[in-house]
Amino acid sequence: MLLIASITPFGFSIFGLLLLSFYLSYKWLQGDKKEKPGCFSLGLSTLIAFSILMFPLTFSVGIFESGSLYAKIGVVAFWIVLFGGYFYAKATKKTGSFWKIIWTILKYILGAIFLGLFCILYFGMFFYVYQALFTDEQQDFQLWAGIICVFFTSVLSLIIFSLPIMENPIKEKSTFYNLKKALKKPEEVTKLDLSLQDLTEFPTEILQMTNIRYLNLSSNKISNIPLEIKNLTKLEELHLKNNSVGISERTKMRKEFPNINIQF
């Protein structure tokens, strides 16, 4: 009892976060499967989820402990909206859309963080060059740090400016993440990702895409796949993880489509 009384509120929140990470990892790994996930994969997924969730928790605790009243209200409101949205999505069976929104928001936040770090590094390099060439001020900035700054800024610049050149032509011509856009050019589709779309049935329009090689229908509510999919002779991979496909249907599909790598 004395040990429990000595634990801080932040300590209790960490313990609760660990349980939440375990629960989310278990539900994500189990999906619609009846067998239990392995201990190693469950432990690794829990560790990753815990590490990701620790950032908003630490940030929230820091604001709550040192911020103003309005900041505290904002933190509490944030967590209420987050958990309220999750339980609402769970009740309405739209968890796929909920996680898609969360992932989109997370991508923008991480993108903003990386952009900020890049700007600091980039303009710090110019400031160092300016001081070295045009001022006589004594610099505390070490030469090796300047070289590293210049190197990583150059590498990041090359990566950022070359990505549109390398990826856009391929994605625009062959990779699609929206069924309506893909149907405008069905012959050009080689990769179609319709995961997290809350689909209840297999979209038969996909059968028009005769050159498709990769099809991702993960995290939907699809229970069966039509036999006509055999007409897609170039299809190599079919991802159906976290769907409602039963054991008997899986066995049937593996027999009917032996040339397709099906991932459940």
Image (cartoon, helix red, strand yellow):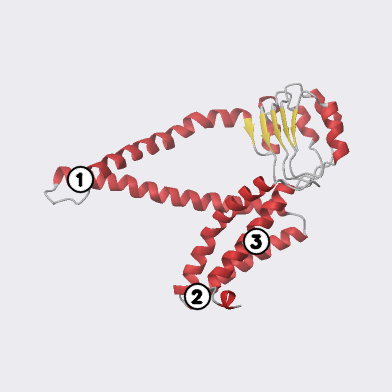
* Residue neighbourhood size for the residue with mark 3, other residues' Cα within 10 Å, grouped as few (<14), some (14–19), many (≥20): some
Give the foreground label among 3 and 1: 3
Mark 2 vs 1, N-terminal side: 2
Q: Are marks 3 and 2 in contact (CB under 8 Å)?
A: no
Q: Residue furthest front?
A: 2
Q: Secondary structure at mark 3?
A: helix
The tag on residue 130 is 1
Q: Residue at label 3? A: 19
Task: Give percent across and percent down for residue 177.
Answer: 65, 38
User: How far apart are the two marked residues, 3 and 2, measured between alpha carbons?
Assistant: 29 Å
Q: Which residue is more in the foreground, 133 or 247?
A: 247
Q: Is residue 130 visible?
A: yes
Mark 3 vs 1, N-terminal side: 3
- Give the left or right position of residue 207, taking residue 51 as reference: right
Q: Residue at label 2? A: 70
Amino acid on which disc 3 is placed:
Leu
Quadrant of res 193: top right
